[in-house]
Amino acid sequence: MNNNYSNKPMVTGEWRKILFANYTVPPDLLAKFLPRGVGIDLLDHSCYLTVGGLQFLHMRMLGYKKFTIR
C-alpha cells in the first residue's frame, strides 16, 4: 500500500437522503455520557442534541481498491 496520501480525501462517497433533527435538552441529561474532560457547549443558554441520518452511497476508502459494507 502506498502511503503518499497527503493531498487526497480519506473517504469519498455520495450523501443522500440527509436528515438532521435538533432538540433542546437539559445539559445534565447529556453530561453523564461525555468522556472525562469534555464539556457541553451552549447556544443562547440552551443545550442542543442533534441526531442525524443519511444514506452514504459509492463509498471509497483511501488505500483500498475495493471496500464493501454489507
Image (cartoon, helix red, strand yellow):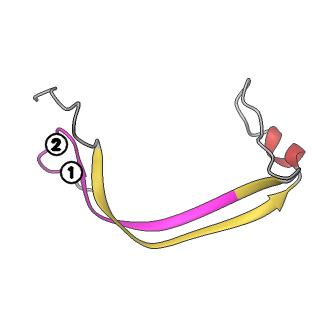
At 16% across and 42% down in the image, what residue appears?
64
Residue 70 visible, this angle: no
Q: For this rendering, which residue is in front, 50 or 8? A: 8
Quadrant housing residue 40 = top right
What kind of element bears circle 2? loop
Q: Are marks 1 and 2 in contact (CB under 8 Å)?
A: yes
Quarter of the image where the N terminus is located: top left
Magenta-drawn stretch contains 54: yes
At 73% across and 23% down in the image, what residue appears?
37
Distance in Å between CA atoms under marks 1 and 2? 6 Å
Residue 67 visible, this angle: yes
Quadrant housing residue 2 = top left
At 22% across and 40% down in the image, what residue appears?
8
Task: Pick out the residue farthest to the bottom.
Answer: 17
Residue 35: x %, y % from top left: 70, 30
Q: Which mark is residue 67?
A: 1
Q: Amino acid at mark 1?
A: Phe
Q: Amino acid at mark 2?
A: Tyr
Q: Is residue 63 above or below residue 45?
A: above
Badge 2 is on which residue?
A: 64
At 89% across and 50% down in the image, what residue appears?
45
Q: Is residue 6 above or below residue 15?
A: above
Determine the main secondary structure of the stretch shown in magenta: strand
Q: Which mark is residue 34?
A: none
User: Where are the magenta residues, as a range?
Assistant: 50-66
Q: For this rendering, which residue is in front, 43 or 32? A: 43
Q: Residues within 10 Å of mark 2 (few under 14, many from 20)?
A: few
